[in-house]
């Protein structure tokens, strides 16, 4: 079998038409900062959109903050351990 020739990544693409493209259309938005997260397919039913993901992460952040603020319980000395 012949392997298909791979097109060099920087080679011009004859089937793509960029004549109606707008240079810098999303430049300002990208400067503000964006994060792209890929959600695993098995989680899409629980997190169908970005708002559901953000809500879950805010809840997790709140729990983590509470857990970090709980002081560690000190072990009490018993009479047998004091000797």
Image (cartoon, grey):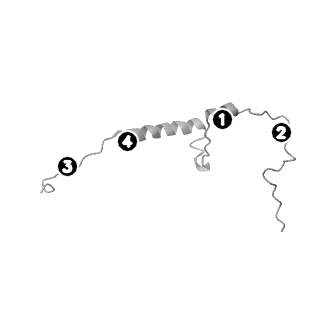
Q: In the rendering, which numbered label is found on residue 30?
A: 1
> Gap between marks 2 and 3, in whole Å?
73 Å
**In terms of secondary structure, where does tag 4 sit?**
helix
**Crowd band around label 4 with a 10 angstrom C-alpha radius: few (<14), some (14–19), many (20+):** few
Q: Nearer the viewer, mark 3 or mark 1?
A: 1
Judge by depth and name the residue closer to the eye, 63 or 17: 17
- On screen, residue 62 versus residue 48, left or right, reads left
Which element carries disc 1, helix, strand or loop? helix
The residue depicted at 77 percent of the width and 34 percent of the height is 23
Q: Say which residue label 3 marks.
A: 76
Q: Residues within 10 Å of mark 3 (few under 14, many from 20)?
A: few
Q: Residue furthest bottom?
A: 1
The residue that disc 4 covers is 68
Which tag, 2 or 1, sits closer to the chain's start?
2
Q: Tell which tag, 1 or 4, sits nearer the viewer.
A: 1
Which sits earlier in the primary sequence, circle 1 or circle 4? 1
Q: CA distance from mark 1 to mark 4?
A: 34 Å
Which of the 4 quarters of the picture holds residue 64?
A: top left
N-terminal label among 3 and 4 = 4
Q: Residue 71 falls in which quadrant of the image?
A: top left
Q: Mark 3 and mark 1: span between their CA atoms?
A: 55 Å
N-terminal label among 3 and 1: 1
User: Most extreme residue toward the right, as rendered?
Assistant: 14
Q: Dividing the image into 4 quarters, which one contains the C terminus? A: bottom left
| Contact check, label 3 and label 4, Cβ < 8 Å | no
> CA–CA distance between discs 2 and 1?
21 Å
Q: Which residue is rendered at x = 62% and y = 49% of the image?
A: 41
């Amino acid at each position: 079998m012949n392997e298909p020739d791979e097109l060099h990544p920087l080679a011009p693409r004859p089937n793509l038409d960029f004549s109606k493209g707008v240079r810098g259309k999303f430049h300002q938005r990208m400067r503000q900062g964006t994060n792209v997260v890929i959600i695993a397919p098995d989680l899409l039913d629980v997190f169908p959109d970005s708002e559901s993901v953000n809500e879950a992460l805010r809840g997790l952040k709140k729990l983590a903050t509470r857990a970090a603020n709980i002081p560690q319980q000190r072990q009490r000395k018993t009479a047998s351990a004091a000797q």
